[in-house]
Image (cartoon, grey):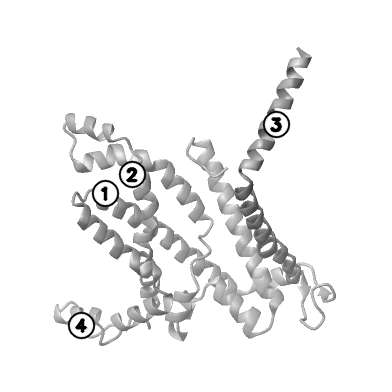
């Protein structure tokens, strides 16, 4: 019996080495990717030491004065930073909800288009905004929402308002503008994953539903949505970790002094303190806080999904 087990183990080892030789090219590529990740993602984490120091570029990380949690204490005693957290979290949640809902809705509706050519044209057009830079997108928004832009022109012609609205002077309009910009730019691209999941659904389910008299909306509700629910959960969990990545470009480009109270995000705060005022330690501390919250959100919601028996990341 022992001899048979030894022969089996030896055979498994031969098969393993044979498989390694067969997959040699893929293993080399994987090794390069791992090395790349270590160099550009993990080694730079040594820079987090700056958050616990009064960092001076001339002295370097290892010779600057150690101040412990002083920078973090300053952050959470700073009213501006607390406001920045509110802005970032609010815009992140709004972007998450609107982006997810619109991507799923667009994928469901596009899947119902029967003419293949029309479907491809719509799909291609919906992808295009994703490849535009935020410079172009914010430029289009600024022109469209200006006093002489198309939006105010339509509102005036329709007698909806008596005078042009200055959208970039009133804080109440800024978050909806950011949400609209993200939805317009990313809905088509975000729907790709959901469309792929829909194509994997067994057509027999739809045929059986049609025999039972189900219409299109009933099929979407009782077949399509339940079947792509695992995909929705995985994408949602991934995006929850990016809630504090509410954006930088659109807020920085569209923001101004009049709406600074609602437009400034953590990334802009880091730029202001870390670069403009040369307080790299404070900027690093803010970045660490952002990363810590993102990790915590993923762990919390992943645990929640696990307890409910839903699809999860780990």
In the picture of the structure, the residue carrying the numbered disc 3 is 14
Q: Of helix, strand and loop, which one carries label 4? A: helix
Whichever of callouts 4 and 1 sits on the residue coming sooner in the sequence is: 1
Whichever of callouts 3 and 1 sits on the residue coming sooner in the sequence is: 3
Q: Which residue is drawn at the image coordinates 18% and 77% (left, top)?
A: 160
CA–CA distance in space, label 3 to label 2? 41 Å
- Asked if the residues shown at circle 2 and circle 1 are in contact, with their CB atoms under 8 angstroms apart, the answer is yes
Q: Of helix, strand and loop, which one carries label 2? A: helix
Q: Of helix, strand and loop, which one carries label 3? A: helix
The C terminus sits in image quarter: top right
Image quarter of residue 81: bottom right
Whichever of callouts 3 and 4 sits on the residue coming sooner in the sequence is: 3
The spot of residue 143 in percent (x, y) is 31, 83
In the picture of the structure, the residue carrying the numbered disc 4 is 153
Give residue 198's mark. Answer: 2
Of the two numbered discs 3 and 1 in the rendering, the one whose residue sits closer to the viewer? 3
- Asked if the residues shown at circle 3 and circle 1 are in contact, with their CB atoms under 8 angstroms apart, the answer is no
In the picture of the structure, the residue carrying the numbered disc 1 is 111
Q: Which residue is drawn at the image coordinates 28% and 82% (left, top)?
A: 165
Q: Which residue is drawn at the image coordinates 77% and 81% (left, top)?
A: 56
CA–CA distance in space, label 3 to label 1? 48 Å
Q: Which residue is drawn at the image coordinates 53% and 63% (left, top)?
A: 244
């Amino acid at each position: 019996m022992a001899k048979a087990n030894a022969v089996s183990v030896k055979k498994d080892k031969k098969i393993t080495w044979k498989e390694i030789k067969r997959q040699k090219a893929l293993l080399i590529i994987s090794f390069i990717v791992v090395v790349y990740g270590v160099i550009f993602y993990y080694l730079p984490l040594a820079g987090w030491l700056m958050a616990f120091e009064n960092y001076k570029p001339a002295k370097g990380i290892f010779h600057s004065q150690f101040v412990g949690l002083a920078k973090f204490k300053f952050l959470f005693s700073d009213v501006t930073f607390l406001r920045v957290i509110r802005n970032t979290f609010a815009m992140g949640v709004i972007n998450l909800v609107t982006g997810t809902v619109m991507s799923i809705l667009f994928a469901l509706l596009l899947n119902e288009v029967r003419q293949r050519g029309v479907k491809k044209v719509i799909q291609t057009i919906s992808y295009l905004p994703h490849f535009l830079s935020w410079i172009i997108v914010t430029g289009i928004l600024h022109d469209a929402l200006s006093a002489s832009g198309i939006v105010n022109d339509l509102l005036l012609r329709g007698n909806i308002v008596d005078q042009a609205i200055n959208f970039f002077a009133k804080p109440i309009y800024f978050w909806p503008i950011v949400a609209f910009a993200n939805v317009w730019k990313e809905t088509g691209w975000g729907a790709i994953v959901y469309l792929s999941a829909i194509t994997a659904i067994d057509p027999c389910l739809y045929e059986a539903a049609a025999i039972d008299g189900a219409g299109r909306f009933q099929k979407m509700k009782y077949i399509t949505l339940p079947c792509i629910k695992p995909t929705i959960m995985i994408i949602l969990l991934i995006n929850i970790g990016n809630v504090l990545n509410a954006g930088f470009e659109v807020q920085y480009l569209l923001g101004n002094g009049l709406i600074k109270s609602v437009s400034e995000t953590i990334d802009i705060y880091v730029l202001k303190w870390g670069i403009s005022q040369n307080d790299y330690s404070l900027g690093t501390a803010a970045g660490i806080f952002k990363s810590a919250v993102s990790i915590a959100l993923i762990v919390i919601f992943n645990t929640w999904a696990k307890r409910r028996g839903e699809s999860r990341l780990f």
